Amino acid sequence: MSDTLSVAWALAWIRGAQAVLAENRETLNDLDRAIGDGDHGENMDRGMKAVVGKLTDEAEDVQGVLKLVASTLMSTVGGAAGPLYGTAFLRAAKAAEGDLDANGVVAVIAGALDGIVARGKATTGEKTMVDAWTPALVAATAAAEGGATPAATLRVAADAAAKGAEDTIPLQASKGRASYLGERSIGHKDPGATSTALILNAAADAAEAA
Amino acid sequence: MSVALVIVSHSAQLADGVVELAAQMARNVELRAAGGTDDGRIGTSFDKVNDAVSELRAAGHDVAILSDLGSATMTVESVLDFLDEDELEHVKFSDGPLVEGAVAAAVTAQVGGDLDAVVAAGRARELFS
C-alpha cells in the first residue's frame, strides 16, 4: 500500500465505481421508484459508462481524472444527479493537488460535499446525498488528524457514508421531488445517498489495492 | 441588444410547447427550447442548454434562461458556472414558474425590455403576491 494516492488510484476508483453502479443499477432504480422518478440507477449507469469510455491511462493526474468525470456526468446523466455529482467532482478536482495524502483525501471529500451543497442547497437531515457525504467528511477528517493512511481515511469515510445512507431511511424528504411525497417519503433509503456510499466504497477499495 | 429566451424543461414537448405559447405574444423574440436529454428521454441536458446559450450569444443576444423542475434548475446553474465572469452580465437565470414566467419574459423582451427587466418579468412574482 502506498503512502499517497496517484492517478492510477483515481483511474481504478472510477472504473470500480462504474462496475459497482452497473451492478446496483436495478437496486438504485427501485429506491428511486419509491420516492422519485425511478431512474437514478439507469442515469448513474449511463453516466459512468460514458466516463469510463473517455478515461485513458494517459490521464496526467488525479485532478485530470476527476475533471473528466465531472464534465462527462454533467452532460450525460440527465437527472438531478448530473449537475450534483458533476459539481461534486468538479470541486473535488479543484481540491486535488498532485497525489493525495490523507489530508488530500479529506480535501477531495470536502470539495465534493461543498459542490453538492452549493448546487442542491440542501443541508443534513433532508434525505439527500448530503446525508452520506457529511458523515464521510467528518470521519475522514478525524482519521487524517489521527495519522491514518489515505486508504484508511477513505475506508472510514466510505463506512460513514454507508451508515449515513442507512440513516436516511427514517427521514422525511424536504428537498427535490421526494419532498412532494411528504410523510410518505419516510421508510425509504435515499437513492443519492446510496450511490454516494457505493462510490466512496469503490474509492476505498481502489486505495487498499494500490 | 435584444434579449432572447432559452426554455429548459425535462420534457422536449413541454419546452417546445412553452416556446410555441410564448411566441404567440412575442413574434420578434428569439426563443429556444432545450428540453429532454440528448437521447430524447425525460431529463435535462447540459449540452442542449449550453449550446442554445452559446448560439444566441454568438448572434449578439442577451439571454434569459427559464426552467421547470429542480434538476433543470441545477443544470442551468451548472451551465452558468462554466461561463466566464463577464458573460454573466449577458446570460441570466430567471427562476420563476415556467409557463407564466416565459410568457411574461417574452412579452417584456418583445417591447424592448433589457435583460434585467426580462429576468424580473420571468420571475413573475406579482402573479403570486
Image (tube, grey):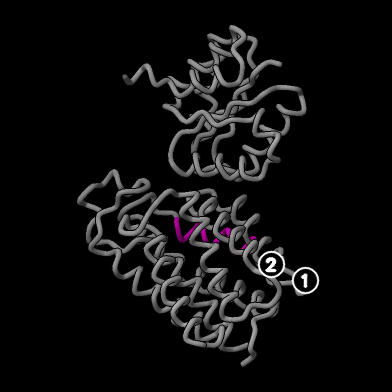
A11 left or right of A116 in image:
right
Q: Is residue A58 left or right of residue A103?
A: right
Q: Which residue is mark 2?
A: A63
**What secondary structure characterizes most of the magenta part?**
helix
In the rendered image, residue A12, in percent from the top left (x then y), is placed at 63, 78
Neighbor class of circle 2 (other Cα within 10 Å; few <14, some 14-19, many 20+) is many
Amino acid type, callout 2: Gln
On screen, B11 above or below A113? above
Query: What is the chain letter for disc 2?
Result: A
Q: Position of residue B11 (x, y in %)?
A: 49, 36
Q: Nearer the viewer, residue A41 or A6?
A: A6
Dot 1 crowding, Cα within 10 Å, few <14, some 14–19, many 20+: few
Badge 1: chain ID: A
Task: Find the magenta span and give its range.
Answer: A40-51
Q: In the displayed structure, would residue A34 be above or below residue A98?
A: above
Query: Which residue in the protein does label 1 denote?
Result: A60
Q: Is residue A16 magenta?
A: no
Residue flagged by tag 1: what amino acid is it?
Glu
Residue drawn 50% across and 58% down? A114
Give the label on residue A168, or none: none
Residue A185 seen: yes
Give the SS element for disc 2. Answer: helix
Would residue B41 be visible to someone looking at this image?
no
Q: Secondary structure at mark 1?
A: loop
